[in-house]
Structure formats: C-alpha cells, structure tokens
Image (cartoon, rainbow, N blue to C red):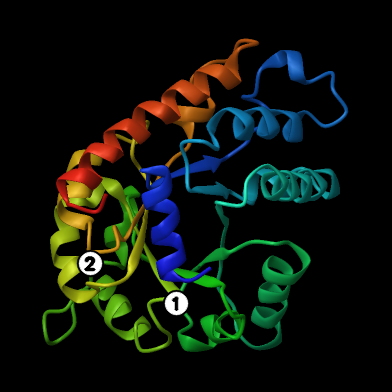
C-alpha cells in the first residue's frame, strides 16, 4: 500500500483512526476467559464493531509475546481475521524493533512475510542499518520513533547539537534520506501536539502515527490543526479509550460507539481541511 492508496482509504472511510489492539489478558472481559483463545475472541469482537470506522489496526506485540506461543497464535489469527473482514485496512506491528544486519533482516521477514503486516514500528538509535532491510519490501512501511509522549522522552530526544537542533529533529531530517514518503512514517505523541507544527516544517509530506489520543489525554483537535497535510498525513491511534471502554458482555458494541465518535470528529477536521 502506498501513500496515495492509504489516503484513498482515509477519504473513503472519512476517518484517520487507528485502533490499538493492546490486548491484555488481565483486562479483557472475564466471560471470555473460559474460551479456547480469549485474546483472539476479544480482538475479533473489537474488529467486528470498529472496522467500519477505522483505517488501521495496531497490535502491540508485547501483549502477545508475553503469552508465549499461544500469544503469537492469537496475533496471527487476529491479522488473518482482519484481512478476511475488510480489504480497506492498514495493519501495523507495534514492535519497536531496533537491530542491525541479519537480525534486522529476520525481523523484516517476520513481519512482512511470515505475518502480513503493512508496517512495523522501529527504533532508529542504530541508524540506517536498522531500517534498510525493511525498505527492501515493496508496499511496506517503516514507522520510525521520532518524538514520544512518555515522561522520560527528554532524557535523549530533546538533547541539542551545536546547531541547536534537537535529537528528534535530526532523526526526522536524517531518516527522510533513507527512503521515500511511500516507505517511511514517524511516530509523534499526541501529547506533544504543540511540536507538530515544527515537525511539519521538517517532514511536510510524511505520514505521522500519533498515539496518545483518548486515555493519555492528547487532543485530536490540536493534532488535526497542526499535523494535517494535503494527504491528511495522520494516523491517530486510540487504544484503551476504545477497546476497554466496557468490560461487560456488550464490550464490542461500546467499542464501536467510541470508535464512531472519533470517526465523526475526524470527518469534521477532514472537511475543514478540504480533504473530502
């Protein structure tokens, strides 16, 4: 899927919502725990109720890896189910991998060949060697961590060089030389919305994956105001605010309602920007 195809889906669904499948066995509704694969059943019901309103899903791999081989089975079934449910979808492996050489090549094979993901999140600390194996796959995306919303992000990301450029700004500038706007996205936390305008000056054409809207307190209005470009350029993620909106039997229905609320708000911003 290239940049224009992703934008076409955004226009078709009138949404730039990404639903994070941070599926915690300790948080899903208790009535699912007696089933053979409660993680998959939870994800299945979330997908059934939200796919109409979202353009992307983002399983956070930590929640699956922690369960061993059963977790990986649940993840594979989830990806396959999403593919069977809707063709108009972008699936992100939130893996935050960051290694070099054959290790990086094997990670790329894992997410793009073994599992049918469209994109994977990557930590760029080790430079181009970390990312280059992923760029060899046509139609696949590398999503580079740039500016995150955690409290200790300032430990490194705001360190300035002798030209007064902050580290996250250098990541944005340098990484864009590694690939095209059809291959690279960047992670920018929604709680850093005030930085989006400056980020857009550095990366005007790139798609940004923006976590932190909803339970983490990020403002969708500010993200849209400062982050949109002529192809929308945003995938705004919400996880807990959607998938854990209810712990009752009707959790899927409630998740769908929460996803629809965000979709309706996103449609307003898309229209304001004359993208619909």
Vertical comparison of 81 with 206: above or below: above
From the top left corner, tell me how far across and down residue 225 is, in percent. Answer: 15, 49
181 to the left or right of 117: left
Q: Nearer the viewer, residue 130 or 37?
A: 37
Q: CA distance from mark 1 to mark 2?
A: 14 Å
Q: Does residue 9 sit above or below 18 in this rendering?
A: below
Q: Which mark is residue 158?
A: 2
Q: Determine which residue is flagged by label 1.
A: 125
Judging from the image, what secondary structure is the residue with disc 2 in?
loop
- Ranked by sequence position, the earlier of labels 1 and 2 is 1
Disc 1 is placed on an element classified as loop
Classify residue 18 as left or right of residue 42: left
- Give the percent coordinates (x, y) of residue 180: 40, 83
Q: Are marks 1 and 2 in contact (CB under 8 Å)?
A: no
* Residue under the image location 50 percent in, 72 percent down: 142
**Does any portion of residue 219 appear in the rendered image?**
no
Q: In the picture, residue 102 is in which quadrant?
A: bottom right
Residue at the far right in the pictured view: 36
Q: Nearer the viewer, residue 139 or 29?
A: 139
Residue at 69% across, 50% down: 83
**Residue 75 in view:** yes
Q: Nearer the viewer, residue 62 or 77?
A: 77
- Rendered location of residue 122, percent (x, y): 51, 69
Task: Report the residue at 15% width, 72% height from top.
Answer: 201
């Amino acid at each position: 899927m290239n940049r224009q195809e992703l934008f076409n889906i955004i226009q078709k669904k009138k949404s730039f919502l990404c639903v994070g499948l941070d599926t915690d066995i300790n948080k899903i509704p208790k009535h699912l725990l007696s089933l053979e694969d409660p993680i998959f059943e939870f994800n299945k019901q979330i997908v059934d109720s939200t796919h109409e309103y979202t353009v992307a899903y983002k399983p956070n791999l930590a929640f699956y890896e922690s369960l061993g081989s059963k977790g990986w089975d649940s993840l594979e079934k989830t990806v396959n189910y999403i593919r069977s449910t809707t063709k108009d979808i972008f699936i992100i492996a939130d893996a935050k991998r960051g290694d070099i050489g054959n290790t990086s090549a094997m990670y790329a094979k894992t997410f793009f060949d073994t599992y049918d993901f469209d994109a994977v999140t990557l930590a760029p600390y080790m430079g181009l060697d970390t990312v280059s194996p992923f760029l060899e796959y046509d139609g696949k995306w590398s999503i580079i961590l740039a500016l995150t919303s955690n409290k200790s992000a300032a430990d490194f990301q705001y360190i300035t060089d002798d030209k007064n450029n902050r580290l996250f700004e250098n990541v944005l500038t340098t990484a864009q030389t590694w690939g095209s706007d059809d291959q690279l996205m960047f992670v920018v936390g929604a709680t850093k919305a005030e930085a989006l305008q400056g980020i857009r000056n550095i990366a005007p054409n790139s798609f940004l994956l923006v976590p932190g809207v909803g339970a983490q307190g990020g403002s969708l209005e500010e993200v849209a105001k400062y982050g949109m470009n002529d192809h929308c350029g945003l995938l705004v993620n919400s996880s807990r605010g959607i998938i854990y909106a209810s712990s009752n039997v009707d959790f899927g229905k409630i998740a769908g309602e929460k996803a629809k609320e965000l979709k309706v708000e996103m449609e307003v911003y898309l229209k304001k920007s004359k993208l619909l």
